[in-house]
Amino acid sequence: MAGIGVRLNKLFEKRSMAAAVVGIGYSTAVTITPMVVVIACVVLMQKVLGFSTLTYVDKEIFLCSMLYIFIFGLLTTSVFSSVISKFIADVIFEERYEDIMPCYYMGLALNMVLAGGAGAAFCIRALIVGRVSPSVIFAAFMGYMALVFVFYTMTYLSVCKTYEKIMLFYLVGMVAAFLLSLLFRFIIGMSIETSMLLAVASGLIITGSLALAVLRQYFKMCSKNYCRIFGHLRKYWKLIVANTAYTLGLYVHNFVFWKSELGISVENTFIYAETYDLASCIAMFTNISASVILLANIEMHFNQSYKEYSEAVIGGRYADIEKTKNRMFGRLVSEIMSIARIQFIISTVLYLVFSILLPRFGFNGLVMTIYPVMAAAYFVVFIMYAAFIFLYYFDDLTGAMRTGIIFCVVTFIGSLVSMQFQRIWYGMGIFAGAVAGWTYSYFRLRWVEKNIDVHIFCRGDILKRKRSKRPSGISYRKNA
């Protein structure tokens, strides 16, 4: 994300109202444009293709397919994304750029096998048990695999700092998806739901292909060292657990309520809880600006303090190290408090706006009953995520892993318990998980602050580690 930080610094250094508006708009666009473009494309296709004329079952199958595509696409990609980011950072530091593309191909193969295996098992069940239309299942499976391809490729492309191109690729892909939906429906004559699903899959493939083309343009050399990524997967397994547990924690409460009285089963295949899922989606949008604020604050402020401390460690005096260390952790606390204050104001305003406007658009009853606690929960989730990212900054993989596990486990157990309460408290599960994760991550950061000297200066090996037979214990033998 360093490229965003450079761009934001250039925008905000002018210190004018116009520059501030442009900077906020740029960081917001970079963060949420892909999601907004995809949602807008699907809504437009529904209007033009006559989605409202479908039967209730067909509508539910399409909506559930889109829901499953994005949830499980994100979950399967999260397994490798954090380790991939770490690998790219290490390769760039070593200036061995020729190892990036081999890692890309091998990682993509692993990700596709993982995602494809899980997706294929579900599709077989949908065909045999649910007797869902094969064309719909095929289109949904293609969309799921295409999204995994896009998410995985974007992890690499972000290294190139071409965020404007990423936004452009999503835009081009979704425009192509809309045009293809017209082709599939009105010229080829496919069903509405199949046309939409296949068009979305095609648009995502176009998006991922454009990203891959740019990636190959940046990294033209290929060392064919395909197995190097396995060393990172083995060495940084805690990253895999941390990122997977955190991502699973974001959705595990939904899975719990899918099996509750709110759950709806479609063709004995798809399960979801419409009211609970809508409430959690609205709550997420209420607090999503926290990710924008975190991005801007880290790249514009904390990154500089972290850089100054690193430079002092390399060649500075002890006094310089202590000074920059105290300044860095002071900046860390300041950034977390800044995110909490600004997001609290934004969330309060959006909560009031949504509470007034959403009932006029049909979002009322149980959705708005669950929404207040859910909005508070996601507020804490995004604050916890800030601390989670700072643990990554200090290479505290154990702390990040424990934070993710605590968040996921407490959210799961809390959701099982809150399911027994009145409906207004249904969101207490994820709220409890977020509070528990935030509490641990906060005290873990304090521990990092106290022990950072040990972490920085007392790690490493005098001899290179390797797997072989134990050397002889004899260090000296006197000849007769």
Image: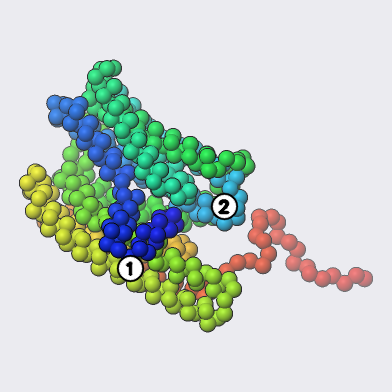
Where 95 falls versus 154 (above or below)? below
Q: Residue at x 60, y 66 (%)?
A: 460
Where, by quadrant of the figure, is residue 24 drawn?
bottom left
Where 448 falls versus 118 (above or below)? below
Which residue matches tag 2? 91
Q: Is residue 340 left or right of residue 150?
A: left
Q: Which residue is more in the foreground, 219 or 205?
A: 219
Where 402 falls versus 182 (above or below)? below
The C terminus: image quadrant? bottom right
Q: Are marks 1 and 2 in contact (CB under 8 Å)?
A: no
The N terminus: image quadrant? bottom left
View extreme (top): residue: 188
Where, by quadrant of the figure, is residue 64 drawn?
top left
Which residue matches tag 1? 336
Crowding around mark 2 (Cα neighbors within 10 Å: few <14, some 14 to 19, many 20+) is some
Q: Is residue 137 left or right of residue 391?
A: left
Q: How is the image coloured?
A: rainbow
In the rendered image, residue 51, in percent from the top left (x then y), is placed at 17, 29
In the rendered image, residue 383, in percent from the top left (x then y), is placed at 30, 63
In the rendered image, residue 317, in percent from the top left (x then y), is placed at 57, 80
Could you say whether the residue bearing mark 2 is in a helix, strand or loop?
helix
Q: Residue at x 26, y 36 (%)?
A: 41
